Image (cartoon, rainbow, N blue to C red):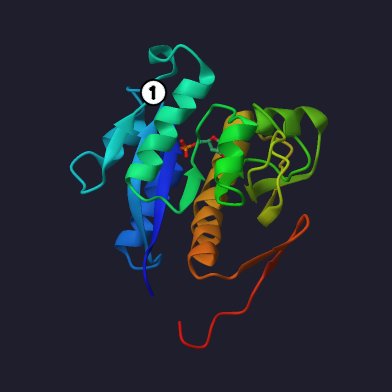
Amino acid sequence: MRKKVLGVLVSGRGSNLQAIVDAINADRLVAKIGVVISDNPDANALRRIAGLDIPTAVVERKNYASKPEFEAAIIEQLDLHHVELVVLAGFMRILSPQFINRFPMRIMNIHPALLPSFPGLDAQAQALQYGVKVSGATVHFVDEGMDSGPIILQEAVPVEDDDTVTTLADRILHLEHRLYVRAVRLYCEGRIHISGRAVKILPPRQNS
Ligand code: GAR
């Protein structure tokens, strides 16, 4: 199977990037990271992959006069590295419809809640504040809305009475790492079928 080329966009800690790198290195995911792009030169995500054979690019918003120019610079990097699937891994910027339409159903995001509940920032704090008894993680394709695109995978975790934002976020993060790798693998295996909003997971191909 030819390896699909991923472009991973990050802004900070990079633990989901790490999970993808680890899965590739352990042959649990057949894919190639074509480029990691960060909008933050100090992102820990960049430190995690320093010394690995993965191209990186820093594209800072402040170096561009407008959002379209900033996004054009990101697209240039994605094209340069022949990226087929854009993976948002803690990338803390909202992409414009123009960007999203350039990669239709080829941008994935992971969100630390069971969408459509608690979209946007601080999802774990939102869940605690609301008082839900289960939360979780969602991997979805990115559309023009806020965390509103077709859902690929979701899994739940319990919310405990004594949870803090930190303990709940940690529990969800463990799940995120597994779930994101699974979703990217399904994409790479050509097993994601999208019909309207509904994403169907196809059975494994006989020859793969
Ligand atoms: C993750 O919890 C991810 O779900 C969240 O940011 C964190 C990034 O962690 N993303 C969002 O909230 C997007 N709305 P990481 O940098 O360690 O992968």
Q: Nearer the viewer, residue 107 or 167?
A: 107
Name the one closer to the observer, 171 or 204: 204
The residue located at (62%, 38%) in the rendering is 168
When asked about the image quadrant of residue 93, the answer is: top right
Amino acid type at image mark 1: Asn
Question: Does ligand 1 reach within 8 Å of label 1's beta carbon?
Answer: no
Residue 2 placement: quadrant = bottom left
Tell me: 135 left or right of 206: right
Farthest left residue?
A: 51
Position in image of residue 160 (x %, y %): 71, 42
- 56 w.r.t. 202: above or below: above
Is residue 42 among what the camera can see?
yes
Graded by Cα atoms within 10 Å as few (under 14), some (14 to 19) or many (20 or more), the crowding at tag 1 reads some
Q: Is residue 12 visible?
A: no
Is 9 situated left or right of 109 in this image? Answer: left
**Residue at image location 61% in from the left, 29% down from the top:** 96
In the image, residue 87 sits, relative to residue 74, either above or below, namely below
Kindly identify the residue that appears in the image at 38 percent across and 60 percent down: 23
In-image side of 88 versus 137 (left or right): left
Q: Position of residue 172 (x, y in %)?
A: 59, 45
Work out which quarter of the rendered image holds the N terminus and state it: bottom left
* Quadrant in the picture for the C terminus: bottom left
Q: Position of residue 203 (x, y in %)?
A: 62, 79
What secondary structure is marked by label 1? loop
Residue at image position (46%, 22%) is: 69
Task: Report the residue marked by disc 1.
Answer: 40
Viewer-proximal residue among 118 and 131: 118
- Relative image position of residue 16 (x, y in whole percent): 45, 45
